Amino acid sequence: MGRRRSPRQAAAGLALLGVLGAGLAACSQSGGTAQAKQACAHVGTSLSLLDQASHADGRSATALDEQAYLQLREALPLAAEAADANSQWQALMTTISESNRVPEHYLVTALRAQCAVANSSVGGEPPPPSSFPPPAPASSAP
């Protein structure tokens, strides 16, 4: 026979389930924003290392370039999780994934722009609107 739980234990168990459920709901509502921000933290470190490498000589520059590359590779699974949660982060994931084929200095502008969007997103809110103008309304012929 099973041991009976006291009402206090039962209430504590239900409270724990409620807290865990709320936490999981918050994660799922983030739409990948949290993961995108985490990926962008690695991107920021990578860009900083790349900048340092541009001012360094020889082996130091090579070592800094390598560290920058490794930071981007650490960002990739986080960006992939973000893109899986919400396709708006697909561009971030794709840009980071290109780092194994394209030198990082060619990706800097795109990475900065994509991370600016991620870092300006609050909670589960979508990123700010695009700077592209909306499509022109369809004209109706009289």
Image: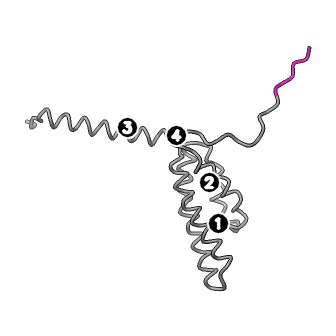
Badge nearest the viewer, 2 or 1: 2
The CA span between labels 2 and 1 is: 19 Å
- The residue under the point 63% across, 59% down is 97
The CA span between labels 4 and 1 is: 30 Å
Q: Nearer the viewer, residue 90 or 136?
A: 136
Q: Amino acid at mark 3?
A: Ala
Callout 2 crowding tier (Cα within 10 Å): few <14, some 14–19, many ≥20: many
Mark number for residue 100? 1
The CA span between labels 1 and 3 is: 38 Å
The CA span between labels 4 and 2 is: 16 Å
The answer to which of marks 2 and 1 sits earlier in the sequence is 1
Q: Secondary structure at mark 4?
A: loop
Mark number for residue 22? 3
For the residues bearing labels 4 and 3, Cβ distance under 8 angstroms: no
Chief secondary structure of the magenta portion: loop
Q: Amino acid at mark 1?
A: Asn
Figure check: 117 above or below 12: below
Q: Secondary structure at mark 2?
A: helix
Q: Taking 108 as reference, is 34 left or right?
A: left
Figure check: 122 above or below 71: above
For the residues bearing labels 4 and 2, Cβ distance under 8 angstroms: no
Measured as percent of width and height from the top left, residue 1 is found at 7, 36
Q: Taking 10 as reference, is 83 left or right?
A: right
Measured as percent of width and height from the top left, residue 115 is found at 62, 54
Q: Amino acid at mark 4?
A: Gly
Residue to which mark 4 is pinned: 124
